[in-house]
Image: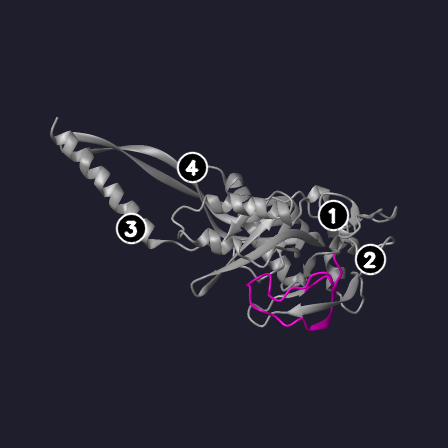
Amino acid sequence: MAFACASCGAQLEYAPGTSMLKCPYCGHENPIAASPWSRVEEIDYAAGLAEAGQAAPQETIQVVSCKRCAAEFQLDPSIQASRCPFCGTPIVLESRAVTHLRPGAVLPFSFDAKGARAKYETWLSGLWFAPNDVRRLAKADYGFIGMYVPYWTYDADTSSDYDGQRGDNYTRTIQDGDKTRTVVETRWTPRSGQVSRGFNDVLVVASRSLPSGYLDKLEPWDLADLSPYDQRYLSGFGAQHYQLDLAGGFEAAKGKMDPVIRRDVCADIGGDKQTISSLQTSYSAVTFKHILLPVWMNSFRYGQQTYSFVINGRTGEVQGQRPWSWVKIGLAVLAGLAVAAAAVMLFNNR
């Protein structure tokens, strides 16, 4: 959706770090005033799955698809991108309509592309063992693209029944000829019980277009500052369509809850050691939010490979791929060996 400038007719863009739409040409500003009845809400998970009931808000959007990484995303009309922001592959700007669950909240960008470049260059300066020309090539990019990346959050109350064993250590003295020695052994006793825990805002990324773990490393996010979804925050930015659906997201959320539940079980069993032989968890009062989080993206080519990186659009945390200079690594290893040899010779000559 385009928002025209009342002064010159150009398209307004969201100004990161503010609650304003700003004209990039004449500087005219329009405030993004929140509706008095608008708020960030949790949606019942079962209702969200009920397609026939249309209980969860939906919208139809125009998305662009990348043939290489399968990313699907919206591009604001002001973004004249000719490459995929996720993998750097050239794309043809042909869109298609997609109906999906409408986001319920958005975390707006807090700094602009200039700020993203500054944080990126700081990250580049810390790349040890990178080829000498990687900084030059990385800076000769096509420009940063601000992309709202889809996430799910889940709330749930859990109740877990378990069977296991409690291990209590004790010492025993063993006579070994004329000598005695003390050994530590474990006495095991069966245990069973139930633990309960409530989870709030378990965060699951719904994009599969970036290398595994990169987006996870951008956490934490200041979810307390989420704003109700408003397309005006997307003006001048892209937004990705989710690739992991609501049900798949909840399965991923369960995977994040499980280690916490297992720690609770071990604490409930007590003792010095614990084993869990069976664990069954039930989930109730499950709710979700579909949210958009701000990420600056870019990529550069070195040799025959494309290297991508992402920047948290709120905190400036940078994560990305980088090439390695095996020549530098080899020289560093040789230098280390030389220092070690010199130290040995110095010690022997004392």
Badge 3 or badge 4: first in the primary sequence: 4
Residue position marked by numbered label 2 in the rendering: 3
Q: Is tag 3's residue or tag 1's residue first in the polypeptide sequence?
A: 1
Q: Specify whether residue 264 is painted magenta.
A: no
- What is the magenta range? 74-103
The N terminus - image quarter: bottom right
Mark 2 or mark 3: whose residue is earlier in sequence? 2
Looking at the image, which residue sits at the far left? 349
Would residue 89 be counted in the magenta stretch? yes
At 76% across and 68% down in the image, what residue appears? 51
Q: Are marks 3 and 4 in contact (CB under 8 Å)?
A: no
Q: Are marks 4 and 1 in contact (CB under 8 Å)?
A: no
- Tell which circle, 4 or 1, labels the residue nearer the N-terminal end: 1
Observer-side mark, 4 or 1, equals: 1
Please determine whether, in this image, residue 170 is positioned above or below residue 93. Answer: above
Would residue 11 be visible to someone looking at this image?
yes
The amino acid marked with disc number 3 is Gly
Disc 1 marks a residue whose amino acid type is Ala
Task: Give SS at disc 4.
Answer: loop
Q: Is residue 262 visible?
A: no
Secondary structure beneath dot 1 equals loop
The local secondary structure at tag 2 comes to: loop
> Mark 3 — residue?
330
Mark 2, Cα crowd under 10 Å, few <14 / some 14-19 / many 20+, is: some
Residue on which the image places disc 4: 272
Give the main secondary structure of the magenta stretch.
loop
Q: Depth check: 30 or 184 in front? A: 30
Q: Which residue is mark 1?
A: 15
Amino acid carrying mark 4 in the image: Asp
